[in-house]
Image (tube, rainbow, N blue to C red):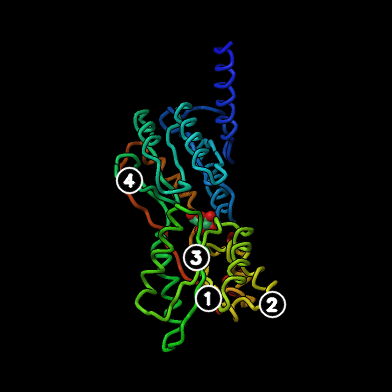
């Protein structure tokens, strides 16, 4: 009786793991690669929390198709435990390469050691882990989030240069414990700490989503009598906050200046309407580079441990011109 129940439970758990993994844009015939030039990548994505993430998923799926790579794609719905299950499932399926964008920075060593023991190389994309053991992954491809936070701070310092009145700032943080939330916060703080007129009055997570960005901004507007600047760790939260600001009868971009990060089309539209003041770019189009990297790793070629994405900063005067060519 107990044995049957345990077997049923185990089968249920396995079904959950396997259903978390679905085929991406590439043909997914279940083959494990293994042949000299055929590659199967297991890709554990964070979720679908933002426009940036949707563009990133599409980029990886399209690139896999173009490169003839079999992609096993899993959406973790912003939950670390789902990503760990997906990685374990990829190990069982003996994929050639595991690639993933870690939801949070900590807590990966155990599962990465399992991948290493199974001799499956791991590539980190977009976000990194805080593991001290560098042998647990072969490369990290993605943005420099500290640099993005610094660029946001640099814009603010220039914008208020020569002024001495206090500048009241509220901050919408990304997912708690994630690399972009940690690094964008510290990069920004490092730049503004040199001038005491900059005061971060409130800082709270909006989990990188529009809905949460709006909700938290509504709370900020109620609790803070005077807000001069909103620093949002991504566009979706900034766009949600814009709704809250407008509903409160204020003008985003004027009454409250807005600094955002990513550079999705909707943010460019808001910028061209004067509602966002500056966007620090974070490029989600990592698919082609990932496929190239995976092929090299499969062949046993040496690869760079850190590959940084090139990114710019866009201000309102550049927004309208840049809008038609934005790809995401
Ligand atoms: O890791 C990149 C961040 O994650 C993007 O800035 C954000 O939009 C996404 O959800």
Picture disc at residue 229: 1
Residue 131 falls in image quadrant: top left
Mark 3 vs mark 1: give the one in front. 3
Q: Is residue 5 visible?
A: yes
**Image coordinates for residue 32, horizontal then vertical, percent:** 48, 28
How many numbered badges does the structure rendering display? Answer: 4
Secondary structure of residue under mark 3: strand
**Image coordinates for residue 289, horizontal then vertical, percent:** 44, 50
User: Nearer the N terminus, badge 4 or badge 2?
Assistant: 2
Q: CA distance from mark 2 to mark 1?
A: 16 Å
Q: Compared to 216, does 61 lie above or below?
A: above
Q: Which residue is mark 2?
A: 249
Estimate how packed mark 4 is, as few (under 14), some (14 to 19) or many (20 or more) residues with alpha carbons within 10 Å. few
User: Nearer the N terminus, badge 4 or badge 3?
Assistant: 3
Secondary structure of residue under mark 2: loop
Secondary structure of residue under mark 1: strand
Residue beneath the point at 43% across and 88% down = 164
Q: Is mark 4 within 8 Å of ligand 1?
A: no
Estimate how packed mark 2 is, as few (under 14), some (14 to 19) or many (20 or more) residues with alpha carbons within 10 Å. few
Mark 4 vs mark 2: give the one in front. 2
Q: Which residue is mark 4?
A: 303
Picture disc at residue 203: 3
User: Nearer the N terminus, badge 3 or badge 1?
Assistant: 3
User: Nearer the N terminus, badge 2 or badge 1?
Assistant: 1
**Image coordinates for residue 111, horizontal then vertical, percent:** 40, 35
Secondary structure of residue under mark 4: loop
Asked if labels 4 and 1 touch by Cβ distance under 8 angstroms, the answer is no
Q: Compared to 115, does 269 lie above or below?
A: below
Furthest residue to the front? 223
């Amino acid at each position: 009786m107990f044995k049957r129940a345990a077997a049923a439970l185990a089968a249920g758990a396995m079904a959950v793991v396997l259903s978390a993994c679905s085929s991406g844009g590439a043909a997914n015939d279940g083959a494990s690669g293994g042949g000299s030039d055929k590659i199967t990548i297991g890709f554990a994505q964070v979720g679908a929390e933002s426009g940036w993430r949707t563009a990133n998923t599409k980029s990886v799926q399209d690139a896999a198709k173009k490169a003839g790579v079999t992609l096993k794609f899993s959406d973790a719905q912003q939950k670390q435990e789902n990503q760990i299950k997906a990685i374990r499932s990829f190990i069982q399926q003996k994929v050639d390469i595991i690639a993933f964008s870690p939801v949070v920075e900590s807590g990966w060593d155990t599962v990465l050691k399992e991948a290493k023991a199974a001799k499956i190389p791991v590539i980190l994309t977009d976000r990194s882990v805080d593991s001290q053991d560098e042998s647990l992954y072969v490369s990290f491809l993605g943005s420099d989030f500290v640099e993005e936070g610094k660029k946001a701070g640099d814009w603010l310092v220039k914008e208020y240069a020569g002024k001495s009145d206090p500048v009241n700032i509220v901050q919408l943080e990304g997912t708690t414990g994630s690399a972009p939330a940690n690094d964008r916060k510290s990069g920004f703080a490092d730049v503004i700490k040199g001038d005491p007129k900059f005061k971060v009055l409130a800082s709270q997570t909006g989990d990188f989503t529009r809905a949460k960005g709006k909700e938290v901004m509504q709370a900020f507007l109620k609790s803070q009598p005077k807000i001069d600047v909103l620093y949002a760790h991504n566009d979706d939260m900034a766009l949600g906050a814009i709704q809250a600001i407008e509903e409160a009868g204020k003008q985003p971009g004027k009454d409250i200046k807005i600094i955002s990060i990513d550079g999705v089309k909707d943010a460019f539209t808001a910028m061209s309407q004067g509602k966002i003041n500056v966007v620090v770019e974070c490029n989600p189009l990592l698919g082609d580079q990932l496929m190239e990297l995976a092929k090299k790793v499969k062949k046993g070629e040496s690869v760079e441990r850190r590959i940084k994405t090139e990114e710019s900063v866009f201000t309102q005067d550049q927004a309208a011109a840049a809008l038609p060519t934005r790809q995401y």
